[in-house]
């Protein structure tokens, strides 16, 4: 299994000049940035929802990389094509979960904003 480069946790993508990194690196950095922002959320539930969503984004990214590798090798056997099909199915399932988590996170933000603007205390 590929080791995770923990240096990306401390990198600041905003300091990277355009064109000096490839799209995969940028995408991975943005996922890590989203995870860091989620972990910094003072609400434990919101922090965990965001972190799980970031994990799902990372899974989707890795699945897409794997599918790209399989498709670039031009699958010539049924087994290789079946592997690509399974990967696509997993990818679509993960993105569906990302959509669900994102909607839940956004609903919670709107509810918190509505409570804040109406002067109603959460507790």
Image (cartoon, rainbow, N blue to C red):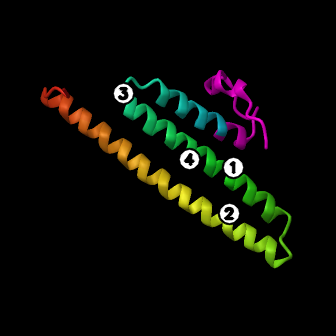
Q: Position of residue 114 (x, y in %)?
A: 20, 35
Identify the residue at horizontal 54%, vertical 40% (top origin): 54
* Residue 4 left/right relative to 52: right
- Queried whether the magenta region covers residue 67, the answer comes back as no
Cα distance, mark 4 to mark 2? 14 Å
Residue 22 falls in image quadrant: top right
Mark toward the start of the polypeptide (2 vs 3): 3
Residue 43, label in figure: 3
Q: Quadrant of the C terminus?
A: top left
Residue 71, quarter of the rendered image: bottom right
Residue extent of the magenta highlight: 1-27
Mark 3 lies on a secondary structure that is loop
User: Which residue lies at the image location 56% right of the left edge and 62% below the top edge?
Assistant: 92
Q: Choose between 120 and 25: the one closer to the eye.
A: 120
- Give me the C-alpha separation between circle 3 and circle 4: 20 Å
Residue in front for this viewpoint, 67 or 122: 122
Residue corresponding to mark 2: 87
Task: Please rate how many residues cluster around mark 3, counting C-alpha atoms within 10 Å: few if below 14, some from 14 to 19, many from 20.
Answer: few
Nearer-N-terminus badge (1/3): 3
Residue 106 location in percent, x, y?
35, 43
Question: Where in the figure is residue 15, as x and y percent of width and height?
Answer: 65, 22
Q: Nearer the viewer, residue 51 or 110?
A: 51
Mark earlier in primary sequence (3, 4): 3
Label 4: which residue?
56
Of helix, strand and loop, which one carries label 2? helix
């Amino acid at each position: 299994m590929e080791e995770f480069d923990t240096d990306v946790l401390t990198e600041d993508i905003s300091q990277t000049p355009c064109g000096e990194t490839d799209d995969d690196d940028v995408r991975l950095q943005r996922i890590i940035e989203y995870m860091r922002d989620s972990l910094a959320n003072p609400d434990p539930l919101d922090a965990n929802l965001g972190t799980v969503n970031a994990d799902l984004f990372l899974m989707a990214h890795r699945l897409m990389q794997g599918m790209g590798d399989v498709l670039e090798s031009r699958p010539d056997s049924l087994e290789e094509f079946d592997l690509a099909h399974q990967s696509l199915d997993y990818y679509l399932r993960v993105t569906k979960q990302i959509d669900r988590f994102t909607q839940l996170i956004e609903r919670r933000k709107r509810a918190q904003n509505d409570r804040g603007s109406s002067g109603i205390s959460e507790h």
